Image (cartoon, rainbow, N blue to C red):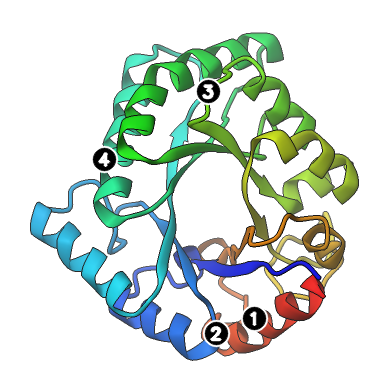
Amino acid sequence: MTAVRLAFSTLGLPGRPLAEVVRLAVTHGWSGLELRCAPGEPVHPAMTAEERRAAARTLTGAGITPLALAGYVGIAAPGDDAAPVAELREQLRLAADLGARYVRVFPRGGDGPAAEADRRAARRLAAAADTALALGVRILVETHDSHRGGRDVARLLDLVHHQSAGALWDLMHTRLAGESPVESFAALAPHLGYVQVKDIAGPQDLTPLPLGGGVLPIAGCVRLLPRDCWVSWEYEAPWFPSAAPLPDLLGPGAAFLTAAAG
């Protein structure tokens, strides 16, 4: 049996106070949170030192692990290196202040040659990796946009060779890229930080569904994972107003993932 650890993303509860989100996690059997780092959210880089300490106390006091800071840096985006590296370092410091072990980045490599995007990303990751190591935080590149497949992100990370740079496996994106869970895991295993899951009706309708209510091979993914790997439910509520509210789905979602791990 694979004993996974369960987290969910605050993306599914946009703008909700951290204390309320923590209460929902505790009530419904989730032990970690992926903290969306964006304007209008309770977690953002402009937080004062006291606000950071208060947020950390809220999490630790309830026994909730701040799994990751979900930032939006485009690590492979066209342009100069200075801005994305500075933004990433700022997010690494925030993650360390909150006690989070990971910072999520997107590729956003654009439409140019993949090799150039890979080199930009590797250069920027290398520039921030020593800061990450000193802070005890790991940078995870999500399977997303220009690097949707596990093989794409693994190819990029193979250029970095630093323990503080790894991968975040978003199951939906690797599946939409045509990879099976076995193929994605084989590519990402040497770099894997944790896994994001979600469910959808199909490639033409990405409206979030309750876990198990769609077509994504969640159980097949979860059963591949090493013991104690974190699995985080990313429910993309802000972009799909018709989606059912997340709070009522959290209890069944935790039960689904626990059963899938068996």
Separation of marks 3 and 2 at Cα, in angstroms: 34 Å
Task: Determine whether label 1 and label 2 are within 8 Å by CB.
Answer: yes
Separation of marks 1 and 2 at Cα, in angstroms: 6 Å
Task: Determine whether label 1 and label 3 are within 8 Å by CB.
Answer: no
Separation of marks 1 and 3 at Cα, in angstroms: 33 Å
Q: Tell me the residue that label 3 is attached to.
A: 162
User: Which kind of residue does numbered mark 4 sit on?
Assistant: Arg
- Across and down, in percent, residue 228 comes to 64, 62
- Across and down, in percent, residue 112 comes to 66, 13
- The numbered mark at residue 254 is 1
Q: Tell me the residue that label 2 is attached to.
A: 29
Q: What residue appears at the point 52 percent right and 29 percent down from the top-left corner?
A: 163
Whichever of labels 1 and 3 marks the residue nearer the N terminus, that label is 3
Please rate how many residues cluster around mark 2, counting C-alpha atoms within 10 Å: few if below 14, some from 14 to 19, many from 20. Answer: some
Query: Of helix, strand and loop, which one carries label 3?
Result: loop
Whichever of labels 1 and 2 marks the residue nearer the N terminus, that label is 2
